[in-house]
Image: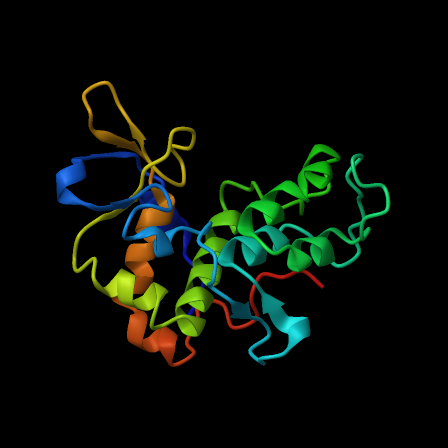
């Protein structure tokens, strides 16, 4: 497999409008499809593909956030001056997806995110998310994989109150409106679930910087 090409990324980033009744949506922990969210717990991933503590990521969100930084990036939150200085190690050590997001805010503020992260042509953030979701399916075929399979052929939409890029917001007409990149990526891995489960990923090397 290869990473997504520019024309594929352009198509992926087109905004859309959806009817809630016609899609497989999720928004909170109370929803039956919550496992589709990167914020869902209990979705352990191992990368590299060896089951050991050094390779353990407690959620897809942790691995995704870690792809923003190399191993040499150091930054401590002002509120925790004695914390582990390595941003990536600190992300990996977090027990929850939310913790993984919060613990690296100091690095974002300091401008330490990888230089190509927001490149609109390469779209490393999207490519990395696809790879992370593939690993989530590979390691969690009977939880995440089951929920993904049960969406059938429906469009998948994450409903958000803040983010209309990865998900969709509810507009004034009650429709779901946004770019919905996460939902579209979930649909991509749904269509390739068997090959992903056999270990065929969009990037064999992955997106973690050295």
Q: In the rendered image of this protein, does residue 158 appear above or below residue 65?
A: above
Position of 138 with respect to 70 (left or right) is: left
Q: Quadrant of residue 153?
A: bottom left
Residue at (40% x, 50% y) in the render: 37
Residue sitting farthest toward the left: 22
Nearest to the observer: residue 189 or residue 157 = 157
**Which quarter of the rendering shows the N terminus?**
bottom left
**Which quarter of the rendering shows the C terminus?**
bottom right
* Residue 7 seen anywhere in this rendered image of the structure: no
Q: Quadrant of residue 159?
A: top left
Q: In the rendered image of this protein, does residue 195 appear above or below residue 11?
A: below
Residue at (47% x, 62% y) in the render: 42
Residue at (52% x, 48% y) in the render: 125
Residue 150 image point, x, y percent:
20, 62
* Residue 55 seen anywhere in this rendered image of the structure: yes
Residue sitting farthest toward the right: 82
Residue 16 image point, x, y percent:
25, 35
Residue 96 image point, x, y percent:
57, 52
Q: Quadrant of residue 86?
A: bottom right
Position of 41 with respect to 183 (left or right) is: right
Residue at (37% x, 73% y) in the render: 196
Residue 134 image point, x, y percent:
42, 65
Say how many tags the image has: 0
Q: In the rendered image of this protein, does residue 68 appear above or below residue 3?
A: above
């Amino acid at each position: 497999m290869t990473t997504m090409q520019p024309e594929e990324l352009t198509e992926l980033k087109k905004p859309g409008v959806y009817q809630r009744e016609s899609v497989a949506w999720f928004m909170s922990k109370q929803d039956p499809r919550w496992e589709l969210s990167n914020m869902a717990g209990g979705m352990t991933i191992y990368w590299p593909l060896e089951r050991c503590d050094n390779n353990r990521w407690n959620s897809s969100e942790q691995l995704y956030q870690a792809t923003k930084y190399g191993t040499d990036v150091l930054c401590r939150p002002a509120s925790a001056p004695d914390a582990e200085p390595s941003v990536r190690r600190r992300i990996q050590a977090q027990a929850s997806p939310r913790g993984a997001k919060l613990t690296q805010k100091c690095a974002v503020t300091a401008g330490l995110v990888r230089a190509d992260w927001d490149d609109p042509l390469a779209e490393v953030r999207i490519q990395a998310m696809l790879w992370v979701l593939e690993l989530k399916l590979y390691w969690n075929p009977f939880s995440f994989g089951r929920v993904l399979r049960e969406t059938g052929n429906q469009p998948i939409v994450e409903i958000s109150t803040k983010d209309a890029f990865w998900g969709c917001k509810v507009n004034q007409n009650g429709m779901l409106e946004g770019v919905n990149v996460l939902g579209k990526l979930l649909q991509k891995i749904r269509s390739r679930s068997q090959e992903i489960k056999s270990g065929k990923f969009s990037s064999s090397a992955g997106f973690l910087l050295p």
